[in-house]
Image: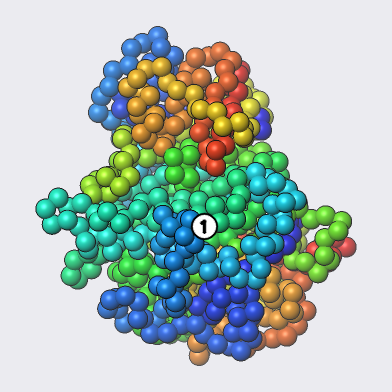
Amino acid sequence: MKIFIEGIGIVGPGLSNWPTSQPVLAGTVPYVGAAIAIPPNDLLPSAERRRTGIPVKLALAVGCEAIAHSHRNASELPAVFASSAGDGDNMHNIFDMLAHNGREVSPTRFHNSVHNAPSGYWSIATKSMAPTTSLACFDASFAAGLIEAATQTLADGKAVVLIAYDAPYPQPLHAARPISSTFGVAMVLYGNKTDRSLAELDISISRKNKSSTPITNSELEAIRVGTPAARSLPLLTALADLRPEMICLDYIADNQLDVTVRPC
Amino acid sequence: MQPLRLSAYTLATPLGAGVSATLDALRAGRSGLARCDFLDVDLDTYVGRISGLEDRPVRADLAVYDCRNNRLAQLGLEQDNFIKTVAAARQHYGRERIGVFLGTSTSGILDTELAYRQRDPETGALPKTFHYVGSHSCYSAADFVQRVLDLAGPAMVVSTACSSSAKVFGSAARMIQAGLCDAAIVGGVDSLCLTTLYGFNSLGLVSSRPCRPYDADRDGISIGEAAGFVLLEKSSASSDPDSVMLLGVGESSDAYHMSTPHPDGAGARLAIQGALHAAGLKPGDIDYINLHGTGTKSNDAAEDQAVFKVFGGSTPCSSTKGATGHLLGAAGVTEAIISALCIQHGFIPGGLNTEHIDPALKSMYLLKNKQQKVNFVLSNSFGFGGNNCSLVFGHGIKRNSR
C-alpha cells in the first residue's frame, strides 16, 4: 500500500510537538526526558472538557496538531483511533466502585468508559460527522491503526487522521499490564501525492519474523518498548531524518509491517 | 463497493446456540430474556444471559484466555460447523491470508471486576489468577479467535460501543480491497458484566421489564450477551447463487453527545444513506430494516426520524432486541446474521414485547412475523460517542442481475 503523510502530531515525555521533536528524533538535538505536558485545547466546551481524562486530552492535542500541519479541515476528516488500553484511570475508578457496596457508577464515568470515548469527544469538538473508528491490538495497536487508516484513505479517497494514544494504568492494574509512558501520535494520511505531502509510505505485511527497528537513544527506546502508541517511534524517526529509509514495526502473529519512507 | 459473500456464519445468543436455534426462536416469537439472575447483581431488570458458560472453560491449550467473553466466543465458534468451514478456507487461501476483525465493548473485564473484590488487603494487588492478556485486554477476543482458528493474517478489535461488530464489516471490506487478505472472519462477542449493567442503570436506561422497542411506554434496554461470526469472501463465478452478500456499509458520527443520540437522527441518516449509496440501491429497494431499536425513549425516537426521512413510512422494520436483548458489541453481527436469515428464508421478524406502538413514531414497525420474499435488508447499529454504522445485505444472484 502506498500512502502519503501530510501532517504529524506528537506528545510524549520530553516530546512536546512535532517541530521541536523532529530534530531530537533526527539526532541533531539531544533528547532530554521530561514529564509530559499536554498542550491545552479549547475545542471542547469547558463543561465537557472537565469530564475528560488524559486519553481524550492527548488525542485532541496530537490530532489537532497533525491536522493543522496538513492545512486540512478537521470537520471533514474521518478519524481512526488506536489504543491498547483506553482510559485506565476511569476504569480503575469504576472497578473500585463496583467492588464496594452500593455499586454507584457515575453516569459520566460510564459513558467515558467506552474505548471510543476519545473518538466521541473528537467528533463533538471538531463538529465532524465523518466516520470515526476506535480499535485495539495490544502492543501492535499503532500498526493496526496505520493499516486501518491507510486502507480507509485508499478505499474512500478521503484524507484520514490516525490518532494513537496510550497512558499507564494506575495500580493495581499497572502491575498486570505495565505501560511505561503517556504517549500520543497523530498522522494525516492521504492516498495521493499533493503539495501537502511530507513523505510517501510504502507499507506491506512481512512474514519474515524480523525484529522491529530499534531507536538509538536508550531512553526513547525504553519508551518505545514500554508504550504501545510509542511503537510508532521508528516511523517518526524515519520521518524526522528526511531521507529514504526502510523500517520495521512489530505487528501480530509473528508478522511485521515493513514501511519504506520516502520524503517528498 | 465490491460485494462480499457471507459464505458461513454462526452465533450463540440468548435465543440459543447456533443458527437454527436463533431462527426457530424468531419464527416462534420466543424471547431469550429472563429476570436478572446474573451473579449477585441486585438490579430490577431482565437480561439475556447464556446459561452454562460457567461450566465451559476454553480449550486447555489456550487456558490463559479463559474468561466469560472468550468462553462465549468459543461457544459461538463451535456451532454450525464453522471451525471446519474456516479450516477449508485456510487450506484454500493460507493461514496468513485470512483476517480476524472482531467487535467488543467490554471484552473480558468481568474478570477484572471480580478480581477487584479480591485485592490483597495489605498491598492492594490483584489475585495472581488474574490474567490481563487473556481477559481484560480489549484485543483479547480477536487474539483468542485467531488462535482457535489457527489463522495468522491481519487482526484487530474494533471497540466503538454498540456499533463495534457492524463496523468490522467495513474494515474487512477495505482490507480485502487493499489486498491485505483474501477473506476475513468478522464478528463480535460481548458478555454480561457489572460495568454495563450498573452503568446503563446509572443513566436510567435499563428497563425493569423485557425491553419494548417502539412502544409508547418503552423505558429502556434489556442487556444481553452473544457471540457471532461470519466468514466473508470475495464473490466468485462459482458462488452459490443463493448465498447472501454484504452489499454496502455506511458509517458516520453524530458530533452531538457522548450517550444521547442526535435528536433528529442526523448521524443515523448519514450512515443509512452511505450504506445505500455503497450498495447502489434506492430506499425503495429495501424490503426490511432491522432497527437498532434499543427500547430507550431517545434512541427509538431519533432512529425513527432518520428512517422515516430516508424511507417514508412504507418499509417494514422491527427491532429484534425484544428477543435477544441489547447485545452491545455483539449486536451488529447478530443482527447482520438475522438479516441474512431473513433473506435466505424469506421471512421478517416482528418485534416482541411491544404492546402499543408509539404514535409519535412514523416508520412501519411490525409486531407480527411475515413470510415474504426478502431481497435486500438494511441493518442499523448505533453506539455511544455518536458512532453509527448501517449495513446492507442482499441476494447474490439478484444483485448481479441488476
Seen at 28% across and 49% down, the residue is: A173
Q: Position of residue A211 (x, y in %)?
A: 51, 27
Q: Position of residue B113 (x, y in %)?
A: 29, 62
Residue at 60%, 63% in the rendered image: B229
At a point 36% along the width and 34% down the height, the residue shown is A226
Relative height, residue B323 to residue A165 (above, below): below
Q: Residues within 10 Å of mark 1 (few under 14, many from 20)?
A: many
Q: Residue furthest top?
A: A28
Q: Is residue A63 left or right of residue B388?
A: left
Residue receiving disc 1:
B103
x then y, percent, for residue A255: 57, 37
Residue B291: percent from left, percent from top: 58, 72
Q: Is residue A23 above or below residue B205?
A: above
Q: Secondary structure at mark 1?
A: strand
The residue nearer to you, when weighing A260 against A197, is A260
Pick the front one: A251 or B31: A251
Q: Please count the marks in the image.
A: 1
Q: Amino acid at mark 1?
A: Gly
Residue A219 lies in what quarter of the image?
top left
Q: Chain of mark 1?
A: B
| Residue at the image point whose x is 74% and y is 79% from the top | B346
Q: Is residue B27 left or right of residue B76?
A: right
Out of B55 and A57, give the one closest to the viewer. B55
Res. B278 visible in picture: no
Quadrant holding the C terminus of chain B: bottom right
Would you identify the image quadrant in which residue A154 lies?
Answer: top right
Q: Quadrant of residue A167?
A: top left
